[in-house]
Image (tube, rainbow, N blue to C red):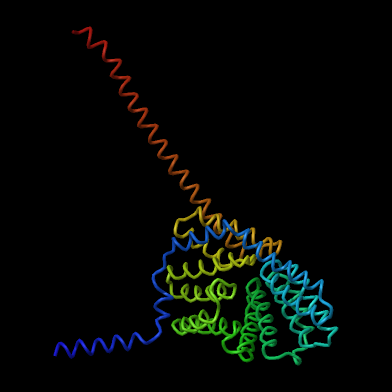
Amino acid sequence: MRAILYWGLTVILTFIGTFPLSAQRIDEEPNLEALYQQIDDAIDHSSQYVAQRLSKIGNARDMLQGASSNEEQLAVAEQLFELYKPFKNDSALYFADLCISLSDSLKLKNKVGLYRSLKAYQCSISGMYVEALDLLKGVDKQVLSNEELAKYYATWMHVYGELGSYSQQSSRREYYFGLQDSYRDSVLAVAVEGSEEFLHLKMDVLCARQLYQDALAVSEKWLSEVTDGTHENAYAAFYRSVVYDKLSNSQQLRYWLGKSALDDIKCAVNDQASLFMLAERLCDDGDFDRAYRYVRFCESCNRKFSPQLRNYQVRYAVNVYNMAYQNAQASYSRLLIVACVAAVLLMAVLGYFVLRLRRQPKQSKRN
């Protein structure tokens, strides 16, 4: 009987072992200190990663200079737009304009609309909402493919989400968020299933419905389709952290924010977000020195991307600085209390010995 039970258990374990264990591996207990040390090292070597991106940009600029036709120039201009998009916003805007101009000269109406949409998105993420809306209103969506429409609708969604977030009037805020929801549906209707636009919005919808395990399943699919160490992987990792934030899993939240930040640092991405959020969490953990360093690095990167910090970035920076300041003040107060207590004790000891010394002669005379 024991032999039969043993054989049955072996078969079951073997059968289970045939299933993929990606979920088990992907969410094993993280070594956060090791991850933070990798981030520290990446920050120390960030100039090397920037040099690598600048080298690619330099090669592409040389190719643009040597291009002999508008078609060749457009292909290279598209590469340069992608290289600058997360790195330096004003240069990304310049090459978006160049793509629009070259596409127009080649009668590529869909490309004109695409790069108007992409330029509008760059405007939106840097706080230029009026410019973004003007660009979007000039797009002829009838000539766009489904993939191009997804980017067009995604930009409308982003702009209205930003306007809703910063509106001071509740009625306008609800109006803008309503439009954001409408455009989210539009993106999901035309986006290719499995594309970046589709996956992160699908996760948003599942999280809103509190279907967190389903969102994690979508996240695993997404992470399996991107390459580790890329900006695309950083984006996918960030959205996994969002799910764990909803689940109040602090360890996994910190891990995936850290993974996202690490990939972006190594890719010389200046449009940093994950590291700002991780810094605030580190303050909650009492690691103020590291949090302060991360925020300073984030500020430097984001000012290179766009001269003016955006509202959410300012909020994270101010929160970290305030918490670090309060901790410093508390440490100073504790140190002051300890110093005062030590001074009182020292005075008491000295007083005791002085009293002993004063009594000593009187005792000698009596003897």
Query: Picture coordinates of residue 191 (x, y %)?
Result: 62, 88
Query: Picture coordinates of residue 330 (x, y %)?
Result: 46, 48
The image quarter in which residue 232 lies: bottom right
Q: On the rendered image, what quadrant is the N terminus found in?
A: bottom left
Does 354 sit above or below residue 308?
above
**Left or right placement of residue 163 versus residue 263 in this view:** right
The image quarter in which residue 47 lies: bottom right
Question: 54 or 303: which is nearer to us?
Answer: 54
Tell which residue pokes out farthest to the left in this image.
Answer: 1
User: What residue do we see at 59% from left, 59% from top?
Assistant: 317
Does 318 sit above or below residue 10?
above
Question: 104 or 191: which is nearer to us?
Answer: 104
User: What residue do we see at 75% from left, 92% from top?
Assistant: 142
Q: How many marks?
A: 0
Query: Picture coordinates of residue 74 (x, y %)?
Result: 78, 79
The image quarter in which residue 125 lies: bottom right
User: What residue do we see at 56% from left, 83% from top?
Assistant: 199
Tell which residue pokes out farthest to the right in this image.
Answer: 105
Does 80 sit above or below residue 281?
below
Query: Picture coordinates of residue 345 (x, y %)?
Result: 35, 32
Q: On the rendered image, what quadrant is the C terminus found in?
A: top left
Question: 200 or 103: which is nearer to us?
Answer: 103
**Left or right placement of residue 162 versus residue 39 in this view:** right
User: What residue do we see at 63% from left, 67% from top?
Assistant: 269
